[in-house]
Image: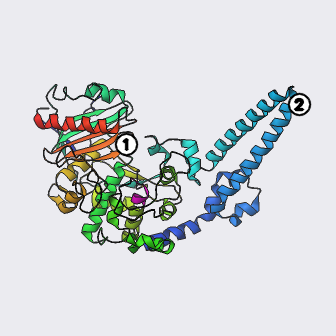
């Protein structure tokens, strides 16, 4: 891990000592762009002589099926030819059968991979097959919308901790903090106390200006944007039913009328969700779908809301759809105006989107920012939603969003898309896959940010390490 060179930081000083209208517009744009989309699709570029198809008499939605059929037929032909060739060249029934099976399997695998590469913009399963498990490189795979920072930035001051201040921090397996950071692919590690930067280190390939993906810390960002929307009156109340903003859900299942926004942000909506790690399971579809609006609308009610905590990515997708309908604006644009500029971000961020064609922000996992700006987000939350005298989000929202409370939902450890550290009063954190953390202690005014390529230890063990870091800073 290394500290950034002088002059590499944005918005810093150095201490001397150390909606429905939007939905209609999206549909209109989709219709208007259908011909262009079809003409530039790989399938049509390779087969322009098929004029009747290139003229889009086949709809875009039918393309995955059409390409799948063609790839399947091609693979079948190759498999048959391969089996015939094997049977001609080899003697012995058992040997020929085994060779034929290997040929068929190999052709099927190659055909599946070829289909996946062709259909990356059209099918969630194709992305799951081609890109496999989610990783931090996804910040480059998905298209994104910019979240512009403003000119009025929260100035952070360099104030390094005394040497050895964190030497007592240990992982459960006994590793030192430095060893743990180095061994787990840590891209960035930042510690703030107030607006003082006590620690700022970056791993190989990462720097102060690098946009780091946050995975599910994006949910915490989304919740904060929702809180601002409620404060501004753009969204009525957390007790509004989701059907007040997305009425077509009730047309499909009347039970959606009982699901409120509060149920969504506390992961107690009662919606069905299966996490199996398969290309067609809910965890994969809600991550890789090239049309997350349609995916959100496909959610199913499984039980009465408010009874059970179930971590479920349909919930943030529906919250994002509510915000889009209520504000009539893309989430990235709204986030920039109401959150990113007012909190004093030092650099532009971005929201990854499902696809260029649909442009719906990946509410569940797609927010990307610099490590220092994640720390600024933590600063905002540690200061009851205020920065430099600006009340960005109400203190009431911040308190409710991060409290260990079961009066309105079933889980003390989770509130409005923020996790609660139940072992330390008042502390809470955003947590994303592969060990992305924004850990906040308002009492001691400490924020700890860890971003990286992999956990390396159990998620709870990381929380323990961040807790120890905050304790050590408070004691220093």
Where residue 172 appears, as percent x and y from the top left, is 28, 29
Where residue 115 appears, as percent x and y from the top left, is 66, 47
Kindly tell me whether residue 462 is visible in this rendering. yes
Q: Residue at x 58, y 53 (%)?
A: 123
Q: Main secondary structure of the magenta part?
A: loop
Q: Residue at x 73, y 61 (%)?
A: 53
Chain part drawn in magenta: 305-317
User: Nearest the camera: 35 or 112?
Assistant: 112
Residue 176: mark in rendering: none
Label 1 secondary element: strand
Q: Quadrant of residue 3?
A: top left
Density class for disc 2 (Cα within 10 Å; few <14, some 14-19, many ≥20) is few
User: Nearest the camera: 423 or 62?
Assistant: 423
Label 2 secondary element: helix
**Alpha carbon distance from label 1 to label 2:** 56 Å
**Is 222 left, or right, of 425 in this rendering?**
right
Where residue 126 appears, as percent x and y from the top left, is 59, 48
Residue 212: mark in rendering: 1
Report which residue position mark 2 lands on.
88
On screen, residue 25 above or below 425: below
């Amino acid at each position: 891990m290394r500290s950034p060179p002088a002059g590499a930081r944005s918005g810093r000083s150095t201490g001397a000592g150390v909606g429905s209208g939007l939905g209609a517009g999206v549909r209109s744009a989709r219709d208007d762009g259908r011909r262009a989309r079809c003409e530039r699709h790989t399938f049509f570029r390779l087969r322009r002589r098929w004029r009747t198809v290139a003229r889009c008499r086949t709809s875009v939605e039918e393309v995955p099926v059409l390409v799948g059929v063609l790839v399947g037929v091609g693979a079948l032909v190759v498999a048959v030819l391969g089996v015939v060739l094997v049977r001609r060249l080899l003697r012995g029934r058992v040997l020929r059968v085994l060779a034929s099976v290997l040929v068929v399997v190999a052709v099927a695998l190659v055909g599946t991979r070829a289909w996946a590469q062709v259909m990356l913009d059209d099918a969630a399963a194709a992305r799951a097959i081609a890109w496999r498990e989610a990783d931090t490189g996804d910040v480059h795979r998905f298209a994104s919308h910019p979240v512009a920072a403003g000119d009025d930035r929260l100035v952070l001051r360099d104030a390094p901790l005394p040497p050895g201040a964190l030497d007592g921090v240990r992982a459960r397996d006994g590793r030192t903090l430095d060893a743990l950071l180095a061994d787990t692919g840590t891209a960035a590690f930042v510690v703030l106390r107030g607006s003082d930067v006590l620690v700022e280190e970056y791993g190989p390939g990462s720097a102060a200006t690098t946009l780091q993906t946050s995975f599910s810390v994006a949910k915490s960002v989304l919740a904060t944007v929702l809180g601002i929307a409620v404060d501004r009156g753009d969204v009525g109340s957390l007790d509004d039913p989701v059907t007040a903003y997305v009425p077509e859900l009730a047309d499909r299942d009347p039970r959606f009328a009982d699901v409120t926004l509060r149920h969504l942000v506390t992961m107690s909506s009662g919606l069905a969700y299966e996490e199996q790690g398969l290309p067609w399971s809910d965890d994969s579809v809600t991550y890789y779908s090239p049309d997350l609006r349609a995916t959100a609308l496909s959610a199913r009610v499984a039980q009465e809301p408010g009874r059970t905590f179930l971590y479920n990515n349909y919930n943030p997708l529906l919250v994002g759809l509510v915000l889009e309908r209520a504000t009539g604006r893309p989430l990235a644009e709204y986030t920039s105006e109401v959150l990113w500029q007012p909190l004093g971000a030092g650099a532009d961020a971005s929201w990854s989107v499902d696809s260029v064609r649909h442009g719906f922000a990946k509410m569940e996992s797609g927010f990307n920012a610099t490590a220092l700006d994640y720390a600024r987000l933590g600063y905002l939350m540690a200061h009851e939603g205020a920065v430099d005298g600006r009340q960005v989000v109400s203190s009431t929202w911040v308190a409710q969003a991060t409290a260990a409370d079961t009066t309105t939902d079933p889980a003390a450890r989770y509130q409005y898309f923020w996790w609660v550290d139940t072992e330390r009063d008042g502390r809470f954190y955003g947590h994303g896959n592969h060990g992305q953390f924004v850990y906040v202690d308002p009492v001691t005014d400490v924020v700890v940010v860890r971003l990286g390529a992999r956990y390396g230890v159990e998620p709870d063990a990381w929380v323990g390490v961040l807790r120890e870091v905050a304790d050590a800073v408070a004691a220093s």
